[in-house]
Image (cartoon, rainbow, N blue to C red):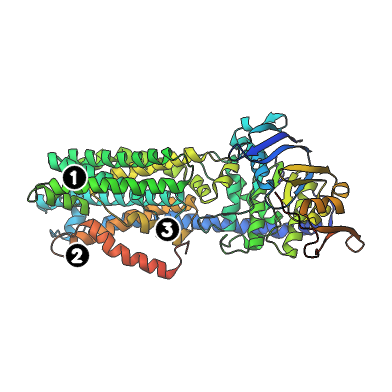
Amino acid sequence: MGLTYSAEKLRFSWDGKRDIFRDVSFSLTTGEIFCIIGPNGTGKSTLMKCMIDILEYQEGIARLDGTDIRTIDRKTLAKRIAYVPQGYQVAFPYTVLEYVIMGRAPYISPFSSPEEKDLEIAVMAIQEAGIMHLIDKSINEVSGGEHQMALIARALAQQPELLLLDEPTSHLDFGNQMQVLSLIERLKDRGITIVMTSHFPDHAFMVSDVVGIMKDGSFTTIGPAEKVITNDSLKETYHVDIRVEYVEIAGRKVCIPIKNQPGCYCPVKG
Amino acid sequence: MDSVEHAPVKNNPVSSIESIRIPEIAYDLNVIKQKIHIARNVRILLFILPFAVMFWSLFIGRYEVEPVTVVKILLSQIFPMERTWTNADETILFQVRFPRIIAAVIVGAALSMAGAAYQGLFKNPLVSPDILGVSSGAGFGAAVAILYSTAAWMIQLSAFAGGILAVMGSYFLSKLYKSGQILILVLSGVIISAFFGALLSITKYVADPYEKLPTIVFWLMGSLSSVRYSDIYAILPAILIGGSILLLIRWRINLLALSPDEAKTLGIDLKQITRVIIVCATLLTAASVCISGIIGWVGLVVPHLGRMITGPDYKKLLPLTIVMGSSYLLVMDDLSRTLIATEIPLGILTALLGAPFFAYLLWRRKTGWA
């Protein structure tokens, strides 16, 4: 089992005039965690949607094992790549089990329903996400963090090789954030490749193998967290002073935003 | 790749905690399977309900036939028996009551299934089968036919065609806007409904007020009083095709409850499933309307009832709407022919009783979405 995913010079624009992102290139191999950080509105989510062919990029090419993803049919793609969106919408109050079992859709023919095997895989995924206690609960009644876990469980039920997580930790409290991150680490250990976007550079130190900083529609740097996340790069990205310090208790580097003096360094973006 | 099933568990602390839990999970899985099994058996048992109501319906009606006689006539179909009843009794039973009961069952089931499917497609529990204008199209078709002809089959054919035409109008109008959004389809349905509503008004306006107009008005009120076997045979193919395709794809309808992006990444061809649902629901509704006239509320209320019982999963919900819809409309039709000395048009009764019933469901707040 192996997977390579590569993107070459992707460009995307809604209207053909203003690029959301351009010249985006990277490549991933089995079991890697690629963490994309960057300020709001730089096109992280859009890039992710292009990666799984929900949105169509205008230039460049994205390949899964050498094949242009646009030529792979949705069903095959869904068996290999799962996507966990940032927002979610459920029109009816399905139970968590019914919700997660929807992840089996690519394996179920249009004229049939989930079978015992699908049920077993869905239950395993629910267990993996640590939400067995919610299995009979209505998805509309669980908390935001629990819904996030149910979404991840649904993605796991797809048995993907590549998992795309769009802001998996936003809107979550510390406890839930750590739960999601340790789940991501466990998934990596069993060979699932993960791409995640995040607002928190800290999370890149915690789980990532490769970090890409995205700003104004392209990657400024890509590399290991140690090298990429520095005082300078963060300042350039977020326009505030951020100190990257090693903290002994945590056993890793952490990022600490320093509140600016008013009028000290507030460049207006043009 | 069975990455979930055969997980190579590495030895980090979290995974080892997970591995301790496994026996308990195995037990849980059996409990879950057992629960699902029991629920399925209960649902299968529910299929007795429409048959019980059908049997009961044979005994009631304005023309009195002794219950014993009804049983005797029924038994005489299987066992040779001495004839102690009049020809009229037998005609009432087999030519009047029986076709009407069958029609109520079919129309109730068809409208409920179409309503449930549309509620899934439009992600909205307040949607009814006529959202894309099938009723106003059928109403106009029927009215025009009544204007020019009195043959029942002409009226039915014209109503059926009008219904299909209206839905096609809504669908292709929505395509013009080049927006993939489902809301555009709803708005197109509103536009087409209003348009055919106006055409219907014109037809009524020019209709002969003594002869034709009452016929049109009665047709629009909806009734099963004049249903014959031939009507049932005529609509049966459309009902069977629409109904069985919806039943086959019913689990997939669930995926429409998710955002379009999510559905796509789960490998769903949204355009295709949208078209399939529209075609099937339109076949079901247009076929029903053309023999019964316009009967509202069934397609709205019954899916709610179903969701209260079994939840929103279409795998369970859609078969249940058949059970509930057929029984519900049959009971309504029984009431319409027995409640008062003259017959109450079925469409009036379903709204008259359906509206307060729906209000009660909302009040219960267990409709499955409120």
Pointer 2 or 1: first along the chain: 1
Which residue was labeled with disc 1?
B143
- Residue at position x 72%, y 44% in the image: B3
Q: Which one is nearer the viewer's eye here, B174 or B323?
A: B174
Q: For label 3, count other residues whose C-alpha is less than 10 Å away and answer few (under 14), some (14-19) or many (20+).
A: many
- The answer to whether the residues at label 3 and label 2 have Cβ atoms under 8 Å apart is no
- Secondary structure state at the residue bearing disc 3: helix
- Residue at position x 65%, y 44% in the image: A46
Left or right, A16 with respect to B68, comes to right
Asked if badge 2 and badge 1 are on a common chain, one would say: yes
Extreme-front residue of the structure: A263
Q: Name the kind of residue labelled 3 in the image.
A: Gly
Q: Chain of mark 3?
A: B
Q: Name the kind of residue labelled 2 in the image.
A: Leu
Q: CA distance from mark 1 to mark 3?
A: 34 Å
- Label of residue B339 in the image: 2
Q: For label 2, count other residues whose C-alpha is less than 10 Å away and answer few (under 14), some (14-19) or many (20+).
A: some
Image quadrant containing the N terminus of chain A? top right
Q: Which one is nearer the viewer's eye here, A221 or A51?
A: A221
Q: For label 1, count other residues whose C-alpha is less than 10 Å away and answer few (under 14), some (14-19) or many (20+).
A: many
Q: Is residue B15 visible?
A: no
Q: CA distance from mark 2 to mark 1?
A: 28 Å
- Secondary structure state at the residue bearing disc 1: helix
Occupied quadrant, residue A57? top right
- Label of residue B306 in the image: 3
- The answer to whether the residues at label 1 and label 3 have Cβ atoms under 8 Å apart is no
Q: CA distance from mark 3 to mark 2?
A: 26 Å
Pointer 1 or 3: first along the chain: 1
